[in-house]
């Protein structure tokens, strides 16, 4: 289950199914992945229901080693922390942007 969001883009997608900051063609996929996250307490469910390997579920490294990422469509991803069956600090971002 999602317990917290981090950022305007993800809040907009969750609440209104749209965001001025995210390309329109990614709105539906973003909401679908967020819905899966909110309806499960198992990380593996996200991988199975999110059309793996297309979502590229992976743990981040370096200063973000507490975070996971799933791909919406490169370069956009949903990043989050996962602990005790809860998704927190959920954010939609292009974290590869330099």
Image: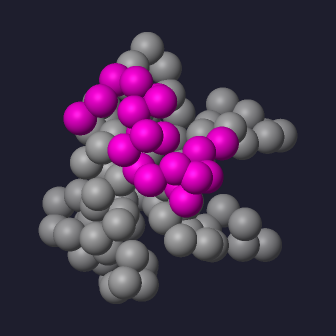
Q: Is residue 6 left or right of residue 76?
A: left
Q: Dominant secondary structure of the magenta stretch?
A: loop
- At 39% from the left and 19% from the top, the residue drawn is 85
Q: Which of the two residues, 56 or 59, is positioned nearer the viewer here?
A: 56
Instruction: Name the quarter where the N terminus is drawn.
Output: top left
Residue 67, placed above or below residue 84: below
Residue 61, percent across and down?
A: 79, 40
Q: Which of the 4 image quarters holds residue 40?
A: top left
Q: Residue at x 39, y 76 (%)?
A: 26
**Residue positioned 53% across, 71% down in the render:** 73
- Residue drawn at (27%, 38%) of the image: 38
> Residue 30: within the magenta?
no
Residue 59: x %, y % from top left: 68, 38
- Which is more toward the observer, 62 or 59? 59
Residue most toward the right? 62
Where residue 4 sits: x, y (%)?
Answer: 34, 38
What scheme was used to colour the molecule? one colour
Q: Is residue 49 visible?
A: yes
Image quarter (top left, top right, bottom left or bottom right) of the C terminus = bottom right
Image quadrant of residue 90?
top left
How many marks on residues? 0
Above-or-below relation of 88 to 98? above
Res 6 seen here: no
Q: Which residues are magenta?
A: 39-58
């Amino acid at each position: 289950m999602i317990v917290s969001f981090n950022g305007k883009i993800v809040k907009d997608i969750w609440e209104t199914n749209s965001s001025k900051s995210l390309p329109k063609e990614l709105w539906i996929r973003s909401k679908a992945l967020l819905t899966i996250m909110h309806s499960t307490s198992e990380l593996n469910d996200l991988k199975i229901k999110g059309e793996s390997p297309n979502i590229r579920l992976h743990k981040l490294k370096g200063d973000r080693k507490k975070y996971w990422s799933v791909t919406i469509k490169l370069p956009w991803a949903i990043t989050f922390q996962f602990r005790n069956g809860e998704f927190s600090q959920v954010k939609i971002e292009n974290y590869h942007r330099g």
